[in-house]
Image (cartoon, rainbow, N blue to C red):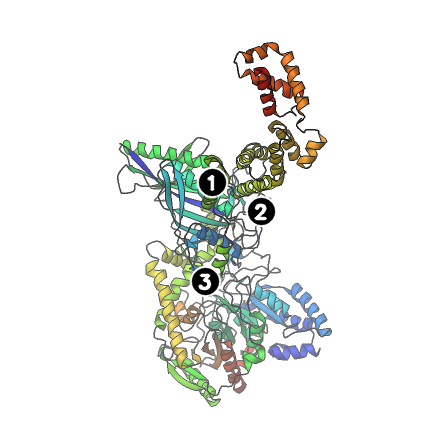
Amino acid sequence: MAWECVIGLEVHVQLKTKSKIFSGASTTFGADANTQACGVDIGLPGVLPVMNREAVLMAARLGIAIGGTINELSVFARKNYFYPDLPKGYQISQFEIPVVEGGQLEIQTAKGPRTIRITRAHLEEDAGKSLHEDFHGLTGIDLNRAGTPLLEVVSEPDLRSPEEAVAYLKKLHTLVRTLKICDGNMQEGSFRCDANVSVRPKGEAQLGTRAELKNINSFRFVERAIYFEIDRQIAVIEDGGSVVQETRLYDPDKDLTRSMRGKEEAHDYRYFPDPDLPPLVITKKELDAIRSAMPELPDAKLTRLASSYELSDGDATLLAADSDLANFFEEAVRAANGESRLIANWILGDLSSALNRESLSISESPVSPEMLGQLINRIKDNTISGKIAKQVFGDLWQGKGQVDDIIQDQGLTQITDSDAISKAVDDVITAFPSQVNQVRAGEEKVIGFLVGQVMKATSGKANPQAVNNLIKSKLSS
Amino acid sequence: MLHLLSLRALRERLQKREVSSVELTKHFIDRITKFSDLNAFISVDEEGALAGAKEADNRLNKNESGNLTGIPIAHKDIFCTKRLRTTCGSKMLSGFTAPYDATVVERLANAGCVTIGKTNMDEFAMGSSNETSFFGNVKNPWHTSRVPGGSSGGSAASVAARLIPAATGTDTGGSIRQPAAFCGLTGLKPSYGRVSRYGMIAFASSLDQGGALTRSAEDSAIMFNAMGGFDPKDSTSIERPVPSVNELLDLDLRGLRLGLPTEFFDDSVDAAVLGSVREALQILEKRGARLVDVSLPNSAAGIPCYYVIAPAEASSNLSRFDGVRFGHRSEQADSLLDLYECSRAEGFGEEVKRRILIGTYVLSAGYYDAYYLKAQKIRRVISDDFKKAFEKCDVIVGPTTPSTAFKIGEKTQDPVSMYLNDIFTNTVNLAGLPSLSMPVGLDGLGLPIGMQLIGRFMDETSLIGTAHQFQLDTDWHERCPEDFS
């Protein structure tokens, strides 16, 4: 039988506010355990939550970007359950009236573009962490994360394959970073996802019973967890069984999902409006301010980059996915007065690998867009060859100065003196008679060897194209 | 007889340096010790109080004093204090000391008050007799076999017995006004949002409101003025200034319309209580107030509505007491679930458990609509009743409680009869309105009778003002229980 899978995603986007959602404690990642948790975060008797406006405005930014409705008035509710890393015994979240309702994201699939509907996005506080290692049979609690603002973005069950799920996630990931509301760091848990997965016979209209896969923290794991889960559910049904509604945990080491709790053990969260927080109001004025400060969104950026510059589809997509990278690209193009394809090659090639090697973001790059543009200019005007440019790039990366200074100081200028090049070519022709004969006999590719010899003799400073032309003309005469 | 003086008289003596704050503090600490049988205090901080008094004297000497500089007060043990443990009347918090001061504590300290100690109360403010306290019941100084009322029973008993000039309290369904009525005091529950709830351990967050138990309307004005006002740490606090003491007291009763709800004057109320309330109304009429009949037709729904909403919020508010971070932690537990169950089973008393169970039940899937949502609708209806009544009158008046103080143990086996004690008070919390109870007489047994005044939202002025004018013509507020004068 042919099967179809149905996937909906719940993504927890950690908002990069300076302080927590209901307290003034810092949200910096990686501090010593329990040093960034104030009375409100640890749920001391008598403390009260106070809304962090920055988080609200960030939620509204996302709402506007996905074309959703920003509720003028939304309500915080308490989600009640006991767990050691949940200090108050309830999580403050939004239930009946979330801050954002509706919206959509368009993804590219093998069969063309598809629109994925978004049900809602709601604000909530994160819980702390339970630490099971290092305590010899005991569990430690770190409440630094407690109260960190999250925006939970819930999609409709519109996704039809693990690849589509990943495409949707990547799209959302790009969007939240473009909007500067999330750092997108998946290892640190700033962007994590639960997946609701079910299968049904192809053509069937009714949804199958779903399993919820919890806390998946990389694009690769999302794909693998869903693949495993689809196969598991199909096997259960084909064996004559039926899928049970449950929560399952993905184990990346073993690449499988495991039952965490069934429907019977599901919590009754006893949601009710939080009496400590008045309804959240967002004014038209605030929304207007957000709209007018909206950055260019990824889709629009892609369309513009593809139409304004000479770029391959792949390069345009890569650049549009990261607004910082795209900005870098456009600045470099401005500095070089064009050469977009060459600049994209440099950025996605040498520059990206250097950044990766040292775990730097594009905004931390020691080579500025102006430097890259200048470097390209020097290739264009034949001052240096592409090969020498790589050497200059290495020096720029190490902070050895500006492009022209480096070329000057190290004497890297191409030999433009045609007599000098001509002499070097003559020397090589004399020194390698058998190769010369090969070329004369029509073995064109041996020209490369001769060019290489000339370049070697001139320490790379000759223009390879000019050398090539010169050899050809001398040997054909 | 320093302990018989009003806050204003104490201030005058202190400012004239006829008495020092240290002397005053010692005098009240002596009385607290002498009358410890009342069990009104959970903690007394002699050392801290004397240090505070010394500081106050320094300021008095330099003429840097305010309304309350050097005057000893006590806090209900629901307000978090850095110096003293905050138990909330529970075994759960019997060893808990907060790392911070509640906003109310901080404001009264800034006004110059010397904190002497923390008063006894019903466990987590759940009770109307102070009998649910882990630290034992409190005796009513007017008749020591009677309850002082609750949940602010320790504050009421200590002010009535002149062990302290004034004390803070909290009122979720009548917990300031009912003990004020039972102990012959003036007790103000301000409008919801007037007094910061920051640092006040939550019972039912949408109903809880801090206030004071005092001997007179004038004292009440002084305390309210010092405690109230906007607090950015409490999102439900209201950004409006509190009137000055003079503004609160200067009220012309001529033309003031006092509304008498028929529902508050029925035969479920003791004849003596109704008699005293009617006499008080006549005195107010003589000063120019007019009496008008009003109706609060849905009052009877108040108790059932309250006993859904308050326990629902309480069940969630009390979840943080799980034995993990602070509070009682069971020694019996050897699993996580055990830790929760045993810590809470051992740490909470019967009434608290009863309300947590009720609250958990009414919020559960399948019951939420029938109970919690329904109660919220009734709450709106009750609130609308008040709005309609205030179209015809400026202040609503009636008895604070259907009877005077009952005997210790009399109602402990019958929670519903205990809950009915708050029948006239808890609708006010549901509507978030300000309300005050003042003494208007004594019954045949010599027990105080309280009259309740209810005002429009944010109109504490009409309540304190009316009570003050009444007290200018009467001396019920100056009566002191026999053995304590």
Query: In what element is the residue under mark 2?
Result: loop
| Label 3 and label 1 in one chain | no
3D distance between C-alphas at marks 3 and 1: 59 Å
Locate residue B75, reporting x and y percent. Answer: 57, 67
**Which numbered disc, 1 or 2, marks the residue closer to the eye?**
1
Residue type at mark 2? Thr
Residue B276: quadrant of the picture:
bottom left
Residue A254, placed above or below residue B50 = above
- In this figure, which residue is indicated by the disc labeled 3? B204
Q: Which mark is residue A306?
A: 1
Locate residue B38, reporting x and y percent. Answer: 54, 69
Q: Chain of mark 2?
A: A
**Which numbered disc, 2 or 3, marks the residue closer to the eye?**
2
Query: In what element is the residue under mark 3?
Result: loop
Locate residue B163, reporting x and y percent. Answer: 59, 72
Within-10-Å neighbours for mark 2: few <14, some 14–19, many 20+: some
In the foreground, A3 or A110: A110
Q: Which mark is residue A14?
A: none
Residue type at mark 3? Ala
3D distance between C-alphas at marks 1 and 2: 37 Å
**Is label 1 in contact with label 2 (beta carbons under 8 Å)?**
no
Locate residue A215, reporting x and y percent. Answer: 45, 41
